């Protein structure tokens, strides 16, 4: 699946700190439990990428 292809998959997303000082992005969908841990610097880079993508998406509409 490419990033630009629509999907009917529904998922829950949780984001928060772990007890080990990491940032966890937890994705849960039918048959999938995917914990992704990032150090704080990586998490901030991801947040910046999400904000930049949101800004570009606003220009599409």
Image (cartoon, grey):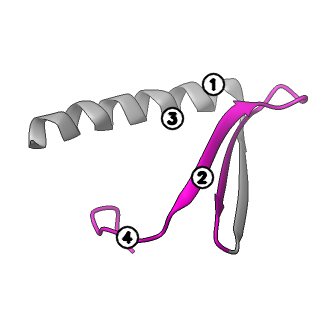
Q: Which residue is mark 1?
A: 41
Q: Which residue is mark 4?
A: 7
Where are the magenta residues, as a range?
1-30
Q: CA distance from mark 2 to mark 1?
A: 24 Å
Contact, CB < 8 Å: mark 1 with mark 3? no
Instruction: Give the mark toward the camera: 1 or 4.
Output: 4
Residue 28 falls in image quadrant:
bottom right
* Secondary element at tag 3: helix
Instruction: Give the mark toward the camera: 3 or 4.
Output: 4
Q: CA distance from mark 1 to mark 4?
A: 30 Å
Q: CA distance from mark 2 to mark 4?
A: 14 Å
* Secondary element at tag 1: helix
In this rendering, position of residue 53 left or right of residue 58: right
Nearest to the observer: residue 12 or residue 21: 12
Where residue 58 appears, as percent x and y from the top left, is 17, 35
Where residue 24 appears, as percent x and y from the top left, is 72, 39
> Neighbour class for label 3 at 10 Å: few (<14), some, many (≥20)?
few
Residue shown at 83% from the left, 25% from the top: 21
Instruction: Give the mark toward the camera: 1 or 3.
Output: 3
Q: Which residue is mark 2?
A: 12
Q: Is residue 22 magenta?
A: yes
Vertical position of residue 30 compared to residue 20: above or below: below
In this rendering, position of residue 49 left or right of residue 26: left
> Neighbour class for label 2 at 10 Å: few (<14), some, many (≥20)?
few
């Amino acid at each position: 699946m490419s990033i630009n292809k629509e999907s009917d998959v529904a998922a829950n997303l949780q984001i928060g700190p772990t007890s080990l000082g990491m940032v966890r992005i937890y994705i849960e969908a039918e048959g999938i439990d995917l914990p992704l841990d990032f150090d704080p610097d990586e998490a901030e880079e991801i947040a910046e990428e999400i904000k930049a993508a949101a800004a570009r998406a606003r220009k599409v509409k």
